[in-house]
Image (cartoon, coloured by chain):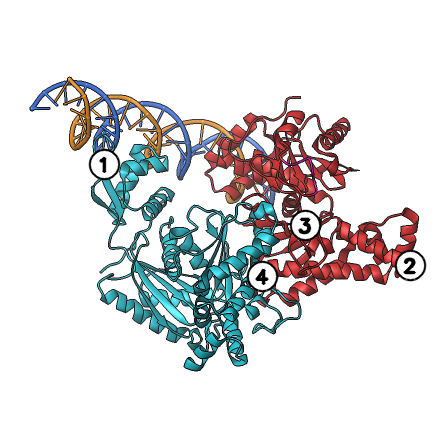
Chain colours: A red, B cyan, C blue, D orange
DNA sequence: CCCCCTTTGTCCTCGGACTGGAGAAAGTCG
DNA sequence: CGACTTTCTCCAGTCCGAGGACAAAGGGGG
């Protein structure tokens, strides 16, 4: 099947496409209410979009008291691919043009195997999704990688946990392999975009999205747009120092937040606790599997294990300390907590909240919700679809 | 004299006005090179601007090889007022439409005397500037106050060091008294805008501007625009915690940056040192005047006093620690240090640099200049003029 | 000093785009 | 079944901007 090549010819068409993406099928009249164009102009632009095949007619809308309007929707055959590459697993999902997830696969995978191996697997996963009949091809793909990205080129730069990825032309390579436009971004930014599109951050202009997984990162949204910084490393809060002369960190410094709280640090602390025998719950789990991960800690905490709860609380305090500083600095309208450790749930959230509300100034915290992400593992892939759709639904 | 009431009628005119403001007098042809409008369209818009009186013809431009072009400039009678209200003094300056400072007055003043008393003095100072013949009236004024501001309304909110100012309708009151449009912002944001317009931050899109004075604040510029946060308190970094359970701070918390380094904290530390007799330099200064300020510390340091230097270094380290975190988070293209303590100069700068370059990740610091502000006390007033001119030079 | 080239400014016409009204089509409701 | 509403299409009038033609102004070489 030939895929979409058309792009909106002007800002009006782009606007209409985004309205249809975010609001679903809509009647011409309703569109008219939202865009402040004359009826004639609107009709012309809609007709042109219909010609390009980007949108299609979709029956009659419900009456608003008079003649019924014809519905318009984005072409139902449009498919976006969202790819979220984590440190230890990969998520791939297909969405329609309204960014609804039609199919979603997760597979374990070590990012350190390098870009070639990872993309082989990603392509296989995409092929599997296509084979289910969900898609005949892809009109665009958005990829998230766990490290800084030079956004315009779509190339990872100096990613600490991804040796072998530095400078790899992700965008170009995947664009070739998939045969469609591709955009690449940091995985945390994708999560932020996902929560903004379909999660808790709808209708918030300025917010932070803290992702606690193998590492810790923070998506920054300013005026509805992701802020990436001068070199694409904005939001890299995992290596903010929380303890002068503290624990050595993989980055070479001491006392970084990540050295105290992250998937890896938590696992190590848990194993230490297991060795010392202070936590029976963790002990048995360790003996069963020979190692421990954040998931074990979450399970132990859920079972009421005091040591596990303490570990989570301590990490939450440290994270909260950093977030408190960021809140004072950035004065966001919302803070979203997400990532692999959301399993730690409300114990973690409570610790973070306590710390932030105590340390930041009342003016900044007065009306500041701090909440868990709503979308879990789909945030990243939805964000990927959103990223590429934003790109495609903008004037060429 | 009737003052300017005209405003640009559309985005093109606004664009032209800003080009003339930032680039000075310009020929029609040069303007044409910058704006991507057809000659006819450009001529029409320029003619309209001439009609409104916002710009005037200004003789002939140098030849570029053919017929000489007519120069265009902003009306030379336009005057903006920049007001920078600090905790202990007020700066007032007049600028022309190109934001060049024509006259500048500084007077000591305690902001705690309240808005009415302060504005009485500001009006007197403005009157004095007018009396010198520099201005026959003002076409707009930009005011900076040392605390958070609800920007759209121009009203201070919950300013910790300005009791009595909370909710005072600064914008409205001053607009009445001066008879011209007024915009109000945080003093740190004004400093950032000043350095952006005429100082070290020209041509940098994303930067931070740290002002160390009575308090510590940070102006945040994203994509050339000042970011103010959800409630206008963005950049309030003085109360970020640098020492768990540390010194009590005026804000009620413990271990805030401001409790360790700021005009007030530095003065107190210096007096302590004088009492203990460890610093002869500070001792004699204390005996002379009965108290010490940051200026004394700067002088003592300049004279080579070891204790004074240590105080500055310690403060710089603490500040650098905070800035390092912000750099990791925000990934700016430039960090500007300014405010009253710039007298502490390179000792301070060196301490901050050391800390930032050591603690932040290479990708963020690799190409990151950390410099002192170029404009000193004029940064704020130029920023004020810039603020109001941005407002007036935008479509009505 | 003259002629030719370049640059700038003005005028004018043509084409395209947009507005808004008229009226037809399609429904709702009493 | 008729009056009213809403939607959609068509059309003419209008406005705006692009870009060519040409005049004005200056530079520089011969």
Q: CA distance from mark 4 to mark 2?
A: 40 Å
Q: Tell me whether the residue at label 3 lies in contact with that at label 2, contact meaning CB atoms closer than 8 angstroms.
A: no
The residue wearing badge 1 is B69
- Circle 3 chain: A
Count of residue discs: 4
- Circle 4 chain: A
User: Relative to residue B364, is residue A182 depicted above or below?
Assistant: above
Give the secondary structure at mark 4.
helix
Q: Residues within 10 Å of mark 3 (few under 14, many from 20)?
A: few
- Circle 1 chain: B
Q: Earlier in the sequence, mark 4 or mark 2?
A: 2
In percent of width and height, residue A281 lies at: 90, 57
Q: CA distance from mark 1 to mark 4?
A: 52 Å
The residue wearing badge 4 is A328
Which of labels 3 and 2 is toward the front? 3
Asked if residue A58 can be seen in this view, the reply is no
- Residues rendered magenta in the picture: A161-166
Q: CA distance from mark 2 to mark 1?
A: 87 Å
Q: CA distance from mark 4 to mark 3?
A: 28 Å
Q: Nearer the viewer, residue B279 or B379?
A: B279
The residue wearing badge 2 is A280
What is the number of the mark on residue A252?
3
In percent of width and height, residue A109 lies at: 77, 37
Query: In the image, are marks 1 and 4 on the same chain?
Result: no
Q: Residues within 10 Å of mark 4 (few under 14, many from 20)?
A: many
Give the secondary structure at mark 1.
loop
């Amino acid at each position: 099947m030939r895929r979409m090549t058309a792009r909106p010819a002007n800002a009006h068409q782009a606007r209409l496409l985004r309205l249809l993406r975010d609001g679903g099928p809509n009647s011409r009249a309703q569109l008219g209410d939202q865009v402040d164009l004359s009826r004639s102009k609107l009709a012309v632009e809609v007709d042109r979009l219909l010609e390009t095949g980007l949108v299609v007619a979709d029956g009659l809308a419900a009456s608003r008291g008079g003649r019924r309007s014809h519905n318009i929707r984005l072409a139902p055959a449009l498919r976006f691919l969202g790819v979220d590459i984590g440190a230890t697993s990969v998520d791939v999902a297909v969405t329609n043009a309204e960014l609804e997830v039609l199919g979603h696969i997760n597979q374990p995978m070590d990012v350190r195997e390098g870009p070639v191996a990872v993309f082989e697997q990603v392509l296989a996963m995409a092929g599997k999704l296509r084979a289910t009949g969900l898609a005949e091809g892809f009109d665009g793909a958005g990829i998230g990688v766990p490290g800084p990205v030079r956004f315009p080129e779509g190339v990872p730069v100096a990613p600490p946990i991804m040796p072998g990825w530095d400078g790899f032309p992700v965008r170009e390579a995947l664009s070739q392999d998939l045969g469609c436009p591709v955009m690449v971004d940091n995985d945390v930014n994708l999560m932020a975009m996902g929560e903004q599109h379909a999660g808790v951050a709808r209708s918030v202009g300025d917010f932070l999205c803290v992702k606690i997984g193998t590492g810790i990162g923070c998506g920054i949204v300013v005026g509805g747009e992701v802020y990436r910084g001068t070199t694409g490393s904005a939001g890299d809060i995992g290596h903010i120092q929380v303890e002068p002369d503290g624990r050595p960190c993989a980055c070479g410094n001491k006392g970084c937040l990540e050295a105290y709280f992250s998937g890896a640090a938590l696992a190590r602390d848990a194993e230490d606790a297991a060795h010392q025998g202070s936590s029976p719950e963790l002990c048995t789990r360790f003996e069963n599997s020979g190692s421990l991960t954040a998931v074990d800690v979450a399970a132990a905490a859920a079972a009421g294990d005091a040591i596990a709860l303490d570990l989570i609380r301590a990490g939450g305090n440290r994270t909260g300390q950093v977030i408190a500083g960021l809140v004072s600095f950035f004065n966001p309208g919302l803070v979203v907590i997400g990532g692999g450790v959301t399993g730690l749930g409300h114990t973690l959230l409570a610790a973070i909240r306590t710390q932030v509300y105590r340390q930041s100034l009342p003016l900044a915290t007065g009306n500041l919700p701090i909440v868990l992400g709503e979308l879990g593992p789909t945030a990243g892939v939805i964000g990927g679809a959103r990223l590429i759709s934003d790109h495609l639904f903008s004037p060429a």
